[in-house]
Every structure is written in C-alpha cells, then in structure tokens.
Amino acid sequence: MKEIKLIGVNGSIRKDSYNRLLLQNIGFLLPDNVKMEIIEIKDVPIYNPDDENKLPTIVRDYKEKIRKSDAVIIATPEYNFSFPGILKNALDWFTRPPNDNVLQHKIAGIVSASSGMLGGSRAQYQLRQVLLYSEMDVLSKPEIFISFADKKFSPEGRIIDETSLGLINAFISNLVNKINKI
Ligand SMILES: Cc1cc2nc3c(=O)[nH]c(=O)nc-3n(C[C@H](O)[C@H](O)[C@H](O)COP(=O)(O)O)c2cc1C
C-alpha cells in the first residue's frame, strides 16, 4: 500500500491543549501506511508582507513539510466563536507569496475540541471560509467536534468516548480514500 504523509497543524499553543491531544489520538488510529507529523505554530512570527520574499526559517520549513505531504489536518480551538488569531497568522504565511501558496489544492481535514457544548463548530465554519480562499480541498464529512473536551480524555490523554472514536475512525477512512483517489 502507498505510504501517506500527513501534517497535523495544532491551532492551540497551550501546554495541555485538547486539540494537540486530539491530533495525537488521530495519530494512534492511523493505518500502518499513514504517518502524521504534528507541527506547532507557537514560534511562527507575526506575518509581515515585507518579509514575504525572505521567509522566516520556521515558515520555510513548515511550508516545505506541507508541500511534501499528502494532506493536512488542522485542529482548532474555538476562541470567541472563531478560530485563534495565531492559527490565522500561520495560515496567512502558508499562502504567501501568492505564487507559492502551499495550501492551494492540498487535501485537508478540520477537527476541533472545546470545553464547550458545541465542540468548536463555530470556529470550524469560519476556518472553512478562510480555506475557501486558499483553495484547500477540505473533507466535508464526518465533522469532528469534540465537545466537553475536559470529559472526553483519560488522564493519560487517550480519547475515552466511543462515539468520538467512531467518528474519528470514519474521518480517517474518508480522508485516506480522498487521498487515494487523486
Ligand atoms: C480567549 C478564549 C475564548 C474562548 N471562546 C470560546 C468560544 O467561543 N467557544 C467555545 O466553545 N470555547 C471557547 N473557549 C474555550 C476553549 O475552546 C477551550 O479553552 C479549549 O480547551 C481550547 O483549546 P485547547 O485545549 O486546544 O487549548 C475560549 C477560550 C479562550 C481562552
């Protein structure tokens, strides 16, 4: 079977982030031929158009990883009914300069975890809108909203909720099928 490379982008920089745990749990459930590397956006500088032609090293490295990947999984918290500014900042870099937008036509999956009852759904829909402009090819279903995230993980960070695990397995399967179709 073909080797598949995924990049997981963690939209939270919090030490005990549920979204990082969510990405890690997706990693545990991947088939043997699929590998995921999680990238952290904490040290990505603030986007400045003046630096577009001399990209910061971390941005160049992350863009290269995304370019070489088969798909990207973005995990986002919900901040004030949207996704965090630090995630928007990283996505802005990844799309620039316009002739080197590494998100363009790249397959993507979006997932979210939130302590709230809607599981980050509002953040996801805003993120989908932003990814329309960058022309990412975003998986539609199933949608992964891990609500009440503080109750869905074991103390060791494993997802303990069977419904969530079932949806994540379906998400992985649909994402891999989408990758294999191209
Ligand atoms: C500034 C801020 C705004 C937030 N706004 C929302 C919100 O609008 N909806 C929601 O469900 N949770 C909201 N939360 C709760 C976060 O979704 C929750 O802290 C989540 O665990 C963050 O993701 P993380 O664990 O990956 O860091 C907010 C948290 C912060 C810090």
Image (cartoon, rainbow, N blue to C red):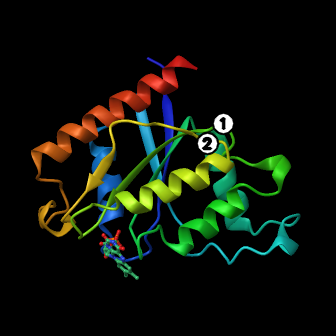
The residue under the point 24% across, 69% down is 116
Mark 1: secondary structure: loop
Toward which corner of the image does residue 41 lie, by quadrant? bottom right
For the residues bearing labels 2 and 1, Cβ distance under 8 angstroms: yes
The residue under the point 63% across, 72% down is 44
Q: Earlier in the sequence, mark 2 or mark 1?
A: 1
Q: Is residue 39 above or below residue 162?
A: below
**The label number, if any, that marks residue 136 in the structure image:** 2
- Position of 109 with respect to 54 (left or right) is left
Q: Nearer the viewer, residue 119 or 175?
A: 119
Q: Tell me if mark 1 has few (under 14), some (14-19) or many (20+) residues whose alpha carbon lies within 10 angstroms of its own.
A: few
Residue behind mark 1: 105
Toward which corner of the image does residue 15 lie, by quadrant? bottom left
Give the residue type that dot 2 points to.
Met
Image x and y of residue 135, in percent: 66, 42
The residue under the point 58% across, 20% down is 182
Q: Quadrant of the N terminus?
A: top left
How many discs appear?
A: 2
Give the residue type that dot 1 points to.
His
